[in-house]
Image: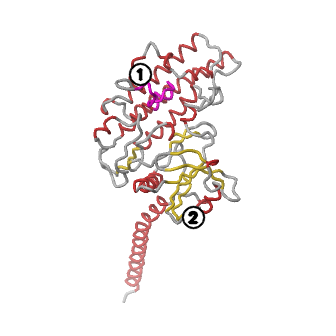
């Protein structure tokens, strides 16, 4: 056999062998990649707290004592927890498993938290599914601890005289609303599978040490799979639960499926509550009068009259220009809240538009306030940080 032919055959064989190796590597990578993706989705613990047993939670909460109780909800109880030999404080949400839907809520929240990542979402560290000391099923989620509690506690402080230390300034409220709207826009427009929160209200908004907002409690959220319409529900939905009284979209009461406009309605009511200081479940709201109509009837002439009076605790002496600018800001916010909480779903502001407008309102006010401080010096009009 000619030498040149031998060389050609060897070269061709080497090339063919290389192509086969590359093909095999490519096939293995394709098979491995989904497995890695699933593994990442299934891991809801950070590396330091991969597994926390029931007994560690029992000790860390002092046997789930009332002294460590942070709050109660429809699906469970939240406790403050400090693990053995750890300085880090955690929050433990223990689910009530007396009804099958409560167990379903645990599954729904785990599924939602695996899928979503955003700086203004409460951070889940891990979960615990075990048996308690009475031999009963035990399920809990472990979250980062929020030192400033819930937004509800700041809007409606119990048994305390309103002061600058237990109420929110106008700038703080604007920042908190922007954080919440950023989360809702992320859930509706940027998640691989669209997520409907279904229960946006002040008690589900927690505040970090710097008063930035964290949206939590996805126990009744709905996950809509890719390429499905907003009206469709999935196996991850929690049957029969649509939201909380005062915040739930009116069409849900008529049997409509969950949708992004439903979240926008809740967001609109939340926004009106934050800037009027009025809860939608107050006794004054009955028959045809609700928080939406209360605000709508007052605008534009009685804007300052219906605004939460605790806002003014954070303001020093105001000149005419400052008073006008604050009134304009409040009017813009309340109008947005009214736009988001209209009775008909198709009339409500789209998520992206609502978020964009809220950013513009906040930024314009902080820019004005920053300029006034620069011009006049002296004490700050409000406590906030310019971004």
Q: Residue at x 33, y 52 (%)?
A: 234
Residue 178, magenta (yes or no):
no
Q: Quadrant of the C terminus?
A: top right
Q: Which mark is residue 294?
A: 1
Cα separation between marks 2 and 1: 51 Å
Are there few (<14), some (14-19), or many (20+) residues within 10 Å of tag 2?
Answer: few
Furthest residue toward front: 134
Q: Are marks 2 and 1 in contact (CB under 8 Å)?
A: no
Q: Quadrant of residue 3?
A: bottom left
| Element on which disc 1 rests | helix
Furthest residue toward top: 320
Left or right, residue 127 beside residue 195? right
Question: How far across and how far down the image is residue 137, in percent?
Answer: 49, 63
| Element on which disc 2 rests | loop
Seen from the viewer's position, the closer of residues 225 and 8 is: 225
Seen from the viewer's position, the closer of residues 26 and 58 is: 58
Q: Nearest to the eye among marks 2 and 1: give it.
A: 2
Magenta stretch, residue numbers = 270-285
Seen from the viewer's position, the closer of residues 142 and 58 is: 58
Q: Residue at x 44, y 49 (%)?
A: 219
Q: Which residue is mark 2?
A: 133
């Amino acid at each position: 056999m000619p030498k040149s032919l031998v060389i050609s055959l060897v070269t061709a064989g080497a090339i063919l062998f290389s192509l086969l190796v590359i093909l095999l590597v490519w096939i293995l990578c394709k098979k491995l990649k989904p497995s890695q993706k699933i593994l990442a989705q299934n891991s809801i613990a950070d590396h330091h707290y991969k597994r926390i047993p029931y007994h560690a939670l029992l000790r860390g909460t002092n046997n789930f004592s009332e002294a460590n109780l942070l709050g109660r909800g429809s699906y469970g109880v939240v406790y403050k927890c400090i693990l053995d030999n750890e300085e880090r404080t955690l929050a433990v949400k223990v689910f009530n498993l007396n009804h099958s839907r409560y167990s379903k809520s645990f599954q729904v929240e785990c599924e939602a938290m695996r899928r979503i990542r955003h700086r203004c979402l409460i951070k889940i560290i891990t979960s615990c599914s075990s048996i308690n000391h009475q031999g009963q099923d035990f399920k809990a989620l472990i979250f980062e601890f929020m030192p400033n509690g819930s937004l509800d506690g700041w809007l409606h402080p119990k048994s305390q005289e309103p002061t600058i230390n237990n109420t929110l300034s106008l700038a703080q409220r604007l920042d908190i609303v922007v954080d919440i709207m950023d989360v809702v826009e992320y859930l509706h427009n940027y998640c691989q599978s669209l997520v409907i929160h279904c229960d946006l209200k002040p008690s589900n908004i927690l505040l970090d040490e710097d008063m930035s907002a964290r949206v939590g409690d996805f126990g009744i959220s709905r996950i809509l799979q890719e390429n499905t319409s907003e009206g469709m529900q999935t196996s991850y939905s929690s049957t029969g639960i649509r939201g909380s009284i005062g915040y739930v979209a009116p069409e849900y009461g008529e049997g409509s499926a969950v949708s992004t406009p439903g979240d926008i309605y809740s967001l609109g009511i939340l926004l009106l509550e934050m800037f009027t200081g009025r809860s939608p479940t107050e006794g004054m709201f009955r028959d045809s009068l609700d928080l939406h109509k209360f605000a709508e009837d007052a605008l534009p002439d009685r804007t300052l009259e219906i605004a939460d009076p605790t806002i003014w605790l954070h303001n020093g002496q105001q000149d005419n220009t400052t008073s006008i600018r604050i009134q304009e800001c409040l009017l813009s916010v309340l109008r947005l809240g009214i736009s988001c909480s209209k009775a008909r779903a198709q009339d409500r502001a789209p998520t992206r538009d609502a978020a964009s407008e809220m950013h513009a309102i906040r930024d314009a006010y902080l820019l004005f306030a920053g300029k006034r401080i620069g011009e006049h010096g002296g004490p700050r009009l409000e406590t906030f940080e310019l971004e």
